[in-house]
Image (cartoon, rainbow, N blue to C red):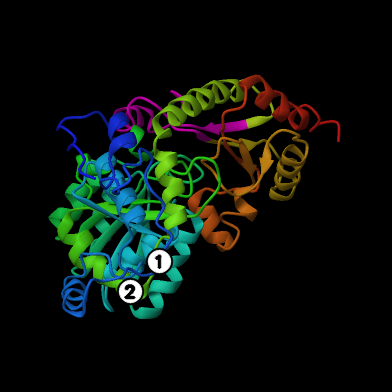
């Protein structure tokens, strides 16, 4: 069924609801879910042509209408020419590396990124002769000093998981491009609702769509967004061969999640800010990490880059005399909750509390954790949509009983 093309200049909130492939002959208003692994061709000659072009639908490892709709919507939201969806966020970074890097190449990466990202660059890519230098998230001079003749990629995550460190995307883009390298930015925390890295000079935008893009903790998904020559000509062939493809059902769930992304991000960010202000008043805490707080070291930069909002994740350090005492205190606060979910995901409508040193960053060495600022007393809270008072009351169950244990 023919559909009317969308006019130019639509707001991202509208694109998040309307961008998709045209409906089928049935005229469905909600995007269809195409659960098929193969597509019947009218004849052998057409099949040969379509397989040679790798553009039409032939096999769902190389393309699926539901996945294409998601990719179109993601690209529209990020303001890029194209996007490619993957099975997870980590598989998106794997696709990035497989498409851009080869033996002898060099990567510069923030030392504050997600723990699995550090291991992927430091261990897995290193097996194939790709070397990575880890630098300060917030000091462009360190990024500049780390460059080598074979530097091909700069990789940043902003804000970072879990300390909410913010990098200057435009500054890193200038450093990368001056060295003939590309800048990739993990935009999982902020999402395109709050931040568009491509508009600030990033070449590739990476997402763990498992998080806020789904928004209800249901499926795994990832994506890379960028110019067509990278997405189609560089990453596309790797995807067709390696097959880290997103399942159609997962793509459909994320498509539906994107329709409410803006509403959720603003609502959850507002709740997170209220809770962050409250946490700063608590005597049991040493520090609260949240970009919207004036106490945050990159507060002004974060407000410029992130549409004036800090996102929905915050972290805080408990006061303690030793790492052992800090860990025991953190476990006590977490175990005392009755409303919050003790889990390692984020981006859900249900608030999630976790201990990064033993979960998301548990596979790092102690030296790597210390370099990333991940102490034993650190707790991460991904704020959902519960009432703020219920969340703070739940945290008080543990905070107010720390000294009486």
Asked if marks 2 and 1 touch (Cβ < 8 Å), the reply is: yes
166 sits to left or right of 168:
right
Give whichever of 211, 203 is nearer the camera. Answer: 211
Where residue 252 appears, x then y in whole percent? 42, 49
Which circle's residue, 2 or 1, is located before the other in the chain?
A: 1
Residue extent of the magenta highlight: 286-313
Res. 392 image quadrant? top right
Where residue 237 appears, x then y in whole percent? 25, 71
Q: Which residue is mark 2?
A: 130
Position of residue 218 relative to residue 192, above or below, is below
The residue sitting at 50% across, 57% down in the picture is: 115
Position of residue 269 relative to residue 169, above or below, is above
Position of residue 299 relative to residue 358, above or below, is above
The label on residue 121 is 1
For residue 373, say whether it is visible.
yes
256 sits to left or right of 225:
right
The label on residue 214 is none
Where residue 395 appears, x then y in whole percent? 70, 30
- Distance from disc 2 to disc 1, alpha carbons, whole Å, reads 8 Å
The quadrant of the image that shows the C terminus is: top right
Where residue 271 appears, x then y in whole percent? 53, 24
Res. 223 image quadrant? bottom left
Badge 2: residue crowd in 10 Å (few <14, some 14–19, many ≥20): many
The quadrant of the image that shows the N terminus is: top left
């Amino acid at each position: 069924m023919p559909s009317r093309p969308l006019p130019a200049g639509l707001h991202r909130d509208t694109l998040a609801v309307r961008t998709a492939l045209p409906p089928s002959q049935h005229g469905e208003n909600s995007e269809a879910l195409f659960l098929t692994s193969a597509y019947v061709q009218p004849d052998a000659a057409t099949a040969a042509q379509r397989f040679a072009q790798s553009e039409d639908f032939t096999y769902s490892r190389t393309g699926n209408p539901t996945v294409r709709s998601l990719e179109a919507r993601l690209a529209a939201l990020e303001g890029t020419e194209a996007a490619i969806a993957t099975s997870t966020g980590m598989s998106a970074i794997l696709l990035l590396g497989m498409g851009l890097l080869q033996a002898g190449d060099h990567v510069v990466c923030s030392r504050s990124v997600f723990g699995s990202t550090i291991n992927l660059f430091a261990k897995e890519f290193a097996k194939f002769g790709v070397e990575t230098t880890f630098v300060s998230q917030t000091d462009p001079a360190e990024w500049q000093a780390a460059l080598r003749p074979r530097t091909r990629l700069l990789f940043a995550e902003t804000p970072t998981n879990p300390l909410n460190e913010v990098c200057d995307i435009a500054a890193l883009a200038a450093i990368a491009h001056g060295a003939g390298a590309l800048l990739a930015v993990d935009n999982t925390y902020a999402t395109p609702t709050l931040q568009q890295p491509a508009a600030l000079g990033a070449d590739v935008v990476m997402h763990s769509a498992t998080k806020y893009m789904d928004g209800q903790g249901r499926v795994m998904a990832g994506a890379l967004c960028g110019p067509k020559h990278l997405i189609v000509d560089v990453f596309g062939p790797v995807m067709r061969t390696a097959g880290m493809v997103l399942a159609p059902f997962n793509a459909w769930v994320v498509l539906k999640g994107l329709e409410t992304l803006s509403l959720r991000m603003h609502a959850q960010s507002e709740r997170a800010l209220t809770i962050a202000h409250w946490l700063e008043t608590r005597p049991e805490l040493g520090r609260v990490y949240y970009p919207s707080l004036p106490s945050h070291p990159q507060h002004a930069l974060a407000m410029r880059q992130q549409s004036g909002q800090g996102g929905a994740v915050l972290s805080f350090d408990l006061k303690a005399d030793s790492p052992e005492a800090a860990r025991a205190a953190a476990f006590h606060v977490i175990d005392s909750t009755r409303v919050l979910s003790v889990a390692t995901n984020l981006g859900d409508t249900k608030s999630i509390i976790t201990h990064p040193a033993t979960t998301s960053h548990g596979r790092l060495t102690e030296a790597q954790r210390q370099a990333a600022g991940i102490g034993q007393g650190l707790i991460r809270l991904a704020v959902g949509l519960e009432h703020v008072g219920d969340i703070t009351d739940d945290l008080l169950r543990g905070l107010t009983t720390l000294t009486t244990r």
